[in-house]
Amino acid sequence: MSSSAVLPDGPSAPPVVQTAELTARPVDFVERCRDRFGGTFSVRLSRIGPMVFFSDPESIKQVFASDRENTITQGRNVVLEPILGTKSLLVQEGAEHLARRRLMLPPFHGERMRAYEQSIERATVEEISNWPTGETILSHPAMQRITLEVIMSAVFGVSDERHDPLRAGLNRVLSSTRSPFAFGLTFPLLRKLPPYSGMLKSLRETDRLIAAEISDRRADPTTEEREDILSMLVSARDEDGQGLDDTELRDQLMTLLLAGHETTATALAWCFDQLLRNPDAYERLRAEIDSDGGGDWMEAVIAETLRVRPVVPMIGRELRKPMTLDGWDLESGTSVMLSIYLAHTRPEVFPDPYVFDPSRFDGVKPDTYSWIPFGGGTRRCIGAAFAQFEMRIVLRTILSTLDLAPGSDSPDQMIRRNVTLSPKHGSPVIVTERRAAA
């Protein structure tokens, strides 16, 4: 981008300061910018340079619509590649990305996805069987345990003696990458220093376990009959009859692990944090679950949770051609950031935007460009349908079994953990009673 390009107003602090603020406290930072400069503003970041933030539905629509020919992802390769690898769907671009997306999409839709319902229910029942009545439970780590077990079953299809070592290895990787310090892996000079050398060691150890699973699955004559996602990816072929090699299989499995574990667990924890403080919404959901297992109101509760507490606060693109957004003429090479959080808190779109109110979505499908917790365009989260399906099963299983109450006097605070906005105190809940089986 030319240094003479005219950009919207934004903070005047040095780029290193703006980078630190956006990294450590992204919600506070963008809200301050919106209060001062309006819904469209620019920031200046270290290693990236100027970046223009948008949150209006029309700009979001234009950017998503241009994904195929006019944008590339902004910053993903820098942040994610050291962990996910160069073949991850999240860092692939252009025709390669579209081809791999088509190859990976089938397991996440329709009847194939429903084959995982029993696995989700079983993992949830096992977790909550250990919750004592009258004591505080941190729902966030509890949901992490559930979603990791779902990944072990649905993605890796492991249930024999290899289960525990692989689960422990995956958990080590997840624990190390949850920290904001994981961004340090983007700097090669830091990778030899603790704690980064430890993170990379965990990755290498887990890679060996994943490689063993891939090798065994390739040699298994029943692979094509299995329903786990690893088996499907081993068997998958593109239009030219080509499959995924071992390196790409590893990178895509690691992508599904990091993208599908922490995000869904965090969304569930936020759901309990918000829902339990709204007795009318909570009781209505329990009544619906008791009646038919969960329907429109459950969908509304999930949609409103993802609106008021989006797990990922923003998504970036880099323009490959000039583009006009919100009245600003932007040059090729401009970095644009679509703020999910700001889009979800626009009062002209969502009145009283900070109030948790599922009735906004009661029988109403969320708007494609105002409600964007899973992104959009050709890069919309491939696991969006699976994540919402998993949330429905976990909520149904827990709320049909337990009576819950908030475990703290006030809503939990948002804190950044790597790329997600997580509950600072783990979203505590209290089991007040176990419900009799119907």
Image (cartoon, grey):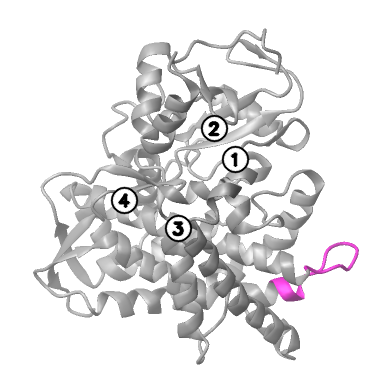
Kind of residue at disc 2: Tyr
Tell which tag, 4 or 2, sits nearer the viewer. 4
**Mark 2 nearby-residue class (10 Å; few <14, some 14–19, many ≥20):** many
Disc assigned to residue 270: 4
Disc 2 to disc 1, C-alpha distance: 8 Å
Q: Secondary structure at mark 3?
A: loop
Quadrant location of the N terminus? top right
Q: Secondary structure at mark 4?
A: helix
Disc assigned to residue 89: none
Quadrant location of the C terminus? bottom left
Kind of residue at disc 3: Pro
Kind of residue at disc 4: Trp
Task: Give the left or right position of residue 202, taking residue 13 as reference.
Answer: right
Disc 3 to disc 4, C-alpha distance: 32 Å
Task: Give the left or right position of residue 306, taking residue 239 as reference.
Answer: left
- Mark sitting earlier along the chain (2/1): 2
Residue interval drawn in magenta:
233-244
Residue 194 placement (x, y as % from top left): 45, 58
- Mark sitting earlier along the chain (1/4): 4
Disc assigned to residue 194: 3
**Mark 1 nearby-residue class (10 Å; few <14, some 14–19, many ≥20):** some
- Mark sitting earlier along the chain (4/2): 4
- Residue at which label 1 appears: 376
Q: Secondary structure at mark 1?
A: loop
Q: Closer to the camera, 266 or 357?
A: 266
Tell which tag, 1 or 3, sits nearer the viewer. 3
Q: Closer to the camera, 250 or 224?
A: 250
The answer to the question of whether label 2 and label 1 lie on touching residues, with beta carbons closer than 8 A, is yes
Q: Closer to the camera, 106 or 341?
A: 341
- Residue at which label 2 appears: 369
Residue 317 placement (x, y as % from top left): 63, 33
